[in-house]
Amino acid sequence: MSTWLRLDGAGSQTSGREALSESQAVDAPSDMPLAIAELKFDSSSLVPIRQQICEAIRAAIWSHELPPGTLLPNSRVLADHLGVSRNTVVFAYTRLVNESLCESKTRRGTRVARDIPYFSQTVETSRLEAPSASTAPLRAAFNARHALETRVNRVSDRVPFALIASDPVLYPRTKLGRRLADKFLSAPPVIHNSPSSASCNTHFQRSVAAYLRNVRGVVCDPEQVVAVSGLESALNLTARVLIDPGDSVAVEDPAMDIVRSAFSSAGAQMFPISSDGQGANPSRMRGPPARLIYVSPSVSFPFGAQMPERRRLEILAAARSQNAIVFECDSCGELRYGGGRLKSLYGLDADQRVVHYGGFFQTLGVFVNVGYLVVPKSLRDCFREIGYLVTTTPPAPVLDAIAEFVEENEYAAHIRTVRSVYAKRLEAVKRACKELLPDVAVSEPLGGLHVVLQFDAEFDECAVTELAALENLPVRSLSQYYQQKCWQKGLVLGFGAVSDQSVRSLVGRIAELIGEAKRATRAPLAEVSR
């Protein structure tokens, strides 16, 4: 049965007098969808005007110029705009409702249907015509093309085994959430002169400087603290300030892929620093003298090793001999489950050649992607000026809320809770791996949110990651984080977003996928032997 909207008058038939002259059409209201405002029809055509209107709106829906849920103008408003009778518009709307392309509700008007049925016919409109072959393609800049070629997986939602995801259940909703709400509600309507003015938030700088002095041995002036939006933002800002195209950058190997992506985008030549059980080993550094050395001494990625003080001093000596700057990544410094408390590289450095990075992302969750850099005094103004060009600085109310959260020692109490939860979860993951994967070596991280499953050289890690991706399990291959050829095969699992109740079942599913990959690898070999 057809659905009809109410018509004004006895019928829906219209005569040739239904169309008014173009001079009588009124300007479109500012809130009218552009596709409707530009709607045109030919009054001299044999096709009825109501049908032309219906076809034009139908084409706009299928071409997504009118997205699902778009509110269409009131029939009287559209009739006045087009210079036609209201019944003509009502007829067009009624037909679209009958075709399930629109939905109409009393006092809520007519909208484009949110659940549009499948439609396979190609919509032919002048706006969707393909460009001619003679049209030259648009060219993106080198940095944009390079970003696409070195694309990085950024799975940070609550997906099991996501590498950079923490547990959103642990977000301090009551204390930090209340502070954030208060700051945003009481924020004065002031437009800052610069989008990065929040990077010089004195309240945030003072609280972070005091916190680092107590827990990291970092002695700095508050003005040396620069607020950033996470590690990737910090790396890009550092590369802008310190790296010229062609400069050499020594990066611990393995390392997060966003590290290599940031420095390669700046045109740097990267050279690996082989790592062992104590982190990056400067005696195995290769290549020309480095402009910058990247290390993560507190918790290395992905094995979670902690660099002893002797090794840290060796890193500083190597940097001094090459006149290099050290980028110290301390993103997981609060998530150390073993080992002693050691001074940071910045705290051990007497030459002011260390850039220290820390952040709240791992401890406060994906909702608070806030970090900070502590830069040498001689480079403070450079980081500040280049920071004016970077628009990814956290909002000032967020920085103020975090500053209060840190000053009131609520952050320290939160860290103790989070560290305890993750330490127990790590043990549960290792226990499940050892039970369900008895032939696989499991790493023993001293910190962080990652576990590495290590296999022999013949293991096809890519086959497992492909199977896991089909089930939305972002398991990563170990070899992708090495710059030099990796003879060790393995899988990297992030356990931050894995709930305690699902640890065993998820590890069990990974074990099944590993078995499937091994059987698929053996099958071609069996055929060859026959």
Image: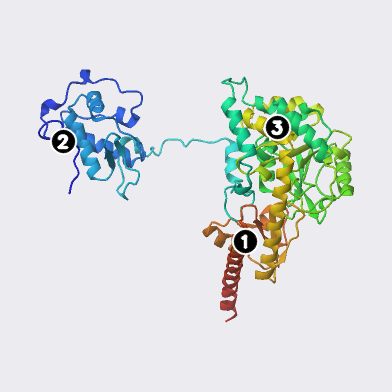
Between circles 3 and 2, the one closer to the viewer is 3
Residue shown at 68%/41% (left/top)? 264
Please give left or right for residue 8 compared with residue 189 in the image. left
Residue bearing mark 2: 47
**Secondary structure type for disc 3:** helix
Of residues 4 and 311, the one nearer the viewer is: 4
Please give left or right for residue 12 compared with residue 433 in the image. left
Query: Which of marks 3 and 1 precedes in the sequence?
Result: 3
Residue shown at 29%/48% (left/top)? 121
Residue bearing mark 1: 503
Residue shown at 69%/26% (left/top)? 201
Q: Are marks 1 and 3 in contact (CB under 8 Å)?
A: no
Q: Amino acid at mark 1?
A: Val
**Secondary structure type for disc 1:** helix
Residue bearing mark 3: 403
Report how far apart the C-alphas of labels 3 and 2 lie in the structure: 68 Å
Report how far apart the C-alphas of labels 1 and 3 lie in the structure: 35 Å
